[in-house]
Amino acid sequence: MKNYRARCIGAVWGLVAAGAMASGGGNAPAEGVNYIAIAPPLIVNYGGADKVRYIKAELSLRAENATDAAEVMHHLPLIRDRLVSILSAQTDDIISTAEGKEYLRVYALAEINKALLKVEGHDHHDEEHAETHSDDHDKKPAAEKDSHGAETTAEAEHAAPALPSAADVKPVKGPASDLFFNNFVVQK
């Protein structure tokens, strides 16, 4: 029983030490690909004030080399801040589908890289200011005349707006090469 207990305590301390290294405390990152856990998990409310709803997200970022990993780990507070803002702005429509979650993942990665590039003083050349979405979402269909001469749109007026997709996000190359949802729980 004592040996089992000692092994459990040793394992817990090993996990604590590994978590400290992943969050910026400890030795420098290893050369090559690094996975950096965003710890502790993010818990945010979302969707406005009409009903209390929560998202709990366990996330990790990937960096392709030690230099990028060190930059990501150094700016984890900034990254957490951006992620809290992004997650809390979501709607049920986006987070309830696999496509919406993929959009959210790609969008969050682009926003993280923009923030990291900005804080490090790197030039970020994005065609249209800091626009992340394609122009297709902003275009309105051409107006037409109905049988009474009134203008209508090519689409039905009561059609649901199209949800964004991952293809709508302009990728931003930066220190974080990918973002992973290790766990994503929604309480509605």
Image (tube, rainbow, N blue to C red):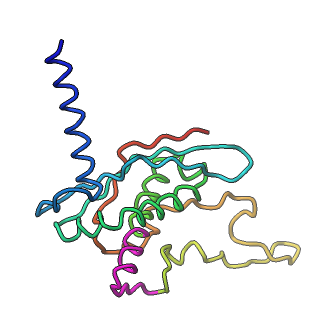
Q: Residue at x 23, y 39 (%)?
A: 15
Nearest to the observer: residue 60 or residue 17: 17
In the rendered structure, does residue 84 fall within the stretch colored magenta?
Answer: no
| Picture layout, residue 149 above or below residue 32 | below
Coordinates of residue 17 in the picture (x, y in percent): 22, 45
Q: Residue at x 12, y 62 (%)?
A: 32
Q: Is residue 65 left or right of residue 172?
A: left
Coordinates of residue 170 in the picture (x, y in percent): 41, 73
* Residue 12 figure quarter: top left
Nearest to the observer: residue 110 or residue 127: 110
Coordinates of residue 26 in the picture (x, y in percent): 20, 56
Query: What's the magenta region?
Result: 111-127
Q: Residue at x 42, y 66 (%)?
A: 78
Nearest to the observer: residue 105 or residue 85: 85
Q: Which residue is at the far right?
A: 148
Q: Residue at x 40, y 68 (%)?
A: 112
Coordinates of residue 119 in the picture (x, y in percent): 39, 79
Nearest to the observer: residue 97 or residue 62: 62
Total number of numbered discs in the rendering:
0
Q: Is residue 81 left or right of residue 181?
A: right
Q: Which residue is at the far top?
A: 1
In which quadrant of the rendered image does the N terminus lie?
Answer: top left
Q: Is residue 151 left or right of residue 159?
A: right
In the rendered structure, does residue 124 fall within the stretch colored magenta?
Answer: yes
| Picture layout, residue 16 above or below residue 30 | above
